[in-house]
Amino acid sequence: MDFIDLILNFCALMLWVIWRSSGFARLQPSIASHSLMAGLRAAPAQSGGRRWSYLMALVGLLGLRSFFYHSVGPAAQWTPTMEFGPVGVAFRTDYLWRALLYSAVSFGKFLGVFYVWVLLFSAVNEPLEDDDPIQGWFRSHLGIVEELPRAAKFLAPGMLGALAWAGLGWAFVVLGMAPPADHASQFVRECLLMGGCAYLPLKLPALIVLSCHLVNSYVYLGRHEWLDFIDATARNALRPLRWLKAGKLDLAPLAAIALILVVDRQARIAVGSAFGGDSGGPYSAAAEPPFGEGAAVSPGESRSGESDPVSAASE
């Protein structure tokens, strides 16, 4: 079920990307002529009605899969759990409204990670010209955000992550899906920590770019526009470490990969400790138990034993 959920999120993301791509008002001829981007860049020629059909298909997909989760989840004893940094929040699919909520929030998180990656490539590759096909595609997806200074793009994931948790964390508490903070200062600290967690998804694209650049530095892989883009991205990202290059020996990619792994590991440990993950802190029991296990929540009750606010209102 988790794999199916991942595939459906990816399909929903593709619908979003096609919808956004079909709305680009200005095309670079040099971008549209490249084979890799030609498929996505062909969308602006479509009619307005067909363009909006992708967005309607996206909404329909999110709605239909929530009904699927509500029908299959209880029988399969599947309780989807979303991780927000060290916090795990479960969505029991025997409640239809929670299946709907999970479908929306799950895709929202998936989409947020995508735009964090887009912001990374936009900020790192700011020196690249607009006629670069792949970089131009990233810039088009950001829209007006692309006009922000580089520093603002680097800060944006943290700020938006903190604001997103301020809303989601409050909603989860109101809906009885997570315990409340003991005081306001604790909730503010949690929002700031969640802002820091927004940078953790950058690990994957960074490692992919640096690894491909490292291999391409010593093994000729041919001329490909995606490989040229990866090399340009890696060179821009490795500028602070260019002193590690001596002749044909370039240790900068290896040093950067090691640094990313160490920082990611230490950051996860620090955030987990700050949330009390190692000592049974306030969020150690945020996820509801799966169906049929332990202190399973009965219909109409929350994890804490209180009535489910939505289910109680409908009774």
Image: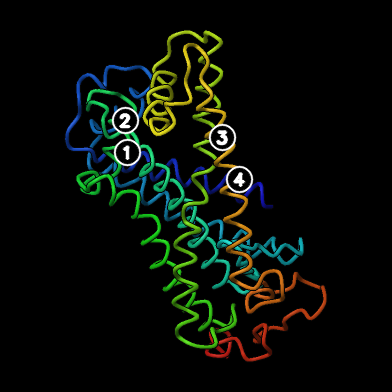
Q: Which residue is mark 3?
A: 257
Q: CA distance from mark 2 to mark 4?
A: 29 Å
Q: Which residue is mark 1?
A: 122
Q: Secondary structure at mark 4?
A: helix
Dot 1 or dot 3: first in sequence order is 1
Dot 1 or dot 2: first in sequence order is 1
Residue placed most toward the observer, 279 or 66: 279
**Going 37% across and 61% down the picture, which residue do you hit?**
160
Residue 45 found in image quarter: top left
- What colouring method underlies this structural image? rainbow
Q: Secondary structure at mark 2?
A: helix
Q: Amino acid at mark 1?
A: Ser
Q: Amino acid at mark 4?
A: Val
Q: Which residue is mark 4?
A: 262
Give the number of the mark in front: 3 or 2: 3
Circle 3 crowding by C-alpha within 10 Å: few under 14, some 14–19, many from 20: some
Dot 1 or dot 4: first in sequence order is 1
